[in-house]
């Protein structure tokens, strides 16, 4: 009798211990379980990744990243995509005390494609839950890593970010060959430039003549694109004068000072939010011979190849002297004043061609194929042959593949008809969770980490 009682008690105790272990195990598991996401941090040990059951947007525990010190950390998942397809990834983000290490860096809590510069807007400071959309074209990829990140490619952040309710949908890309150009004439530059002996304050303004020259060049650029490309590309240009000041400039050794998209982010965000534009030109001054003020640049008049939220971004610099003819039409001096606009936009197509997996010669390699700058016309013939893929080479004709003129940046209007996908769907019950756990274990043991 006595021994049997003890046996029942013993069994009960074992059962209770097992239940306790399971409960504790499950609690730990649900706190640290990131489902199929991989975790990564730039400086090891500066960040913690947890699931949060207190601060959450929906029933599901949120995904929390805390950067105790400045770091670039993210959790990401590889997904399969169809090439040449537009996608929109959305999630809810909440932040607490998110600060960036570098001023004017494109960093904070955001959604991105790992190992690329493509990303959404950032959430910084202390904010309540807000929805963030990230739009991109898969280009020639069949797999991409979608990341939810605190920090960024260009700098570190600290603070806490919570992510929840991940969604992905595919849309229908606009494949017309008409590109919409946003052309912003920045009336005012007002910057402090670091020099060997402290800071130099430079203030510059566009003159009435500058703005007339720009408007003429933009009109000529609009007409020149279909003309030079034999109708392969068409342009709509909208020109706005902007009174917001350019307050900061970026610097690199190759170019000296220039304006990066982040330097004028607040202004361009106002224009691109509605998803209308396929390319951005900004025109401004970096010097004025009359006022003897100058921001040092390394001999560039235009700068291209940059991108902001997937949209090509070019600098157009007004010369320091007003008697310079680079942007003026004159039958004896320059009959191709739109050249800088053409050149910088072609840098975007050159870059796109590469990202879409097309062969193309470098835009600056004209000398190699026997082209040179001509009086009055500059490199007009080179640009025409570049766009028409009629540059003679030992391997046959080369240049831009005609399809590149229909590959415009993904935009919000591409999702008016969209298709919800479930690749970012989280497990909703214990069965799905176990399946997810097994998938993850298989992934780890097969060395995909
Ligand atoms: Zn160039």
Image (spheres, grey):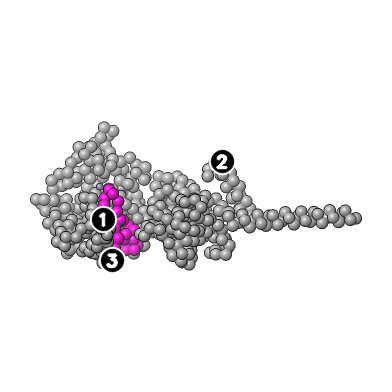
Quickly name the residue at label 3. Answer: 244
In front: label 1 or label 2: 1
Does 229 sit above or below residue 48? Answer: above
Which residue is found at the position 30% from the left and 51% from the top?
252
- In percent of width and height, residue 29 lies at 61, 54
Please give the label number shown on residue 446: 2
Q: Are marks 2 and 3 in contact (CB under 8 Å)?
A: no
Quickly name the residue at label 1. Answer: 196
The magenta region covers 247-269
- Helix, strand or loop for disc 2: loop
- Dot 2 crowding, Cα within 10 Å, few <14, some 14–19, many 20+: few
Where on the picture, by quarter, is residue 98?
Answer: bottom left
- Dot 3 crowding, Cα within 10 Å, few <14, some 14–19, many 20+: some
Which residue is found at the position 22% from the left and 47% from the top?
228
Estimate the spatial distance between the alpha carbons at disc 2 and disc 3, rounded to whole Å.
Answer: 54 Å
Which residue is found at the position 37% from the left and 42% from the top?
357
């Amino acid at each position: 009798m006595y021994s049997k009682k003890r046996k029942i008690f013993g069994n009960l105790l074992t059962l209770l211990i097992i239940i306790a272990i399971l409960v504790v195990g499950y609690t730990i598991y649900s706190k640290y379980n990131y489902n199929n996401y991989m975790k990564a941090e730039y400086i090891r040990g500066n960040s913690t990744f947890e699931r949060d059951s207190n601060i959450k947007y929906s029933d599901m525990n949120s995904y929390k990243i805390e950067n105790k010190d400045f770091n670039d950390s993210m959790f990401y998942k590889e997904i399969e995509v169809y090439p040449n397809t537009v996608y929109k990834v959305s999630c809810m983000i909440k932040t607490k005390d998110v600060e960036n290490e570098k001023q004017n860096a494109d960093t904070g809590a955001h959604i991105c494609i790992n190992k690329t510069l493509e990303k959404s807007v950032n959430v910084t400071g202390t904010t309540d839950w807000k929805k963030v959309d990230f739009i991109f074209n898969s280009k020639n990829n069949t797999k991409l890593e979608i990341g939810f990140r605190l920090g960024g490619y260009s700098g570190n952040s600290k603070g806490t970010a919570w992510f929840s309710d991940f969604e992905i949908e595919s849309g229908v890309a606009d494949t017309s060959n008409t590109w919409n150009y946003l052309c912003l004439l920045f009336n005012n530059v007002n910057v402090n430039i670091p020099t060997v002996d402290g800071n130099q304050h430079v203030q510059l303004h566009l003159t009435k003549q500058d703005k007339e020259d720009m408007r003429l060049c933009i009109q000529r650029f609009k007409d020149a694109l279909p003309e030079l490309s034999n109708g392969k590309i068409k342009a709509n240009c909208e020109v706005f004068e902007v009174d917001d000041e350019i307050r900061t400039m970026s610097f690199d050794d190759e170019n000296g000072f220039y304006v990066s998209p982040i330097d004028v982010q607040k202004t361009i965000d106002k224009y691109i939010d509605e998803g209308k534009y396929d390319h951005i030109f900004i025109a401004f001054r970096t010097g004025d011979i009359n006022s003897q003020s100058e921001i040092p640049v390394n001999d560039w008049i235009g700068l291209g190849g940059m991108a902001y939220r997937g949209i090509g971004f070019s600098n157009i610099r007004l010369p320091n002297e007003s008697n310079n003819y680079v942007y003026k039409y004159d039958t004896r001096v320059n009959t191709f004043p739109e050249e800088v606009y053409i050149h910088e936009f072609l840098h975007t197509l050159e870059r796109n061609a590469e990202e879409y997996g097309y062969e193309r010669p470098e835009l600056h390699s004209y000398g190699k194929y026997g082209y040179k700058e001509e009086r009055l016309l500059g490199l007009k013939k080179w640009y025409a042959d570049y766009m028409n893929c009629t540059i003679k080479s030992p391997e046959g004709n080369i240049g831009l593949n005609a399809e590149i003129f229909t590959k415009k940046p993904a935009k919000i209007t591409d999702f008016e008809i969209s298709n919800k996908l479930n690749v970012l769907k989280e497990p909703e019950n214990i069965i799905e969770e176990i399946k997810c756990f097994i998938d993850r274990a298989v992934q780890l043991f097969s060395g995909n980490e």
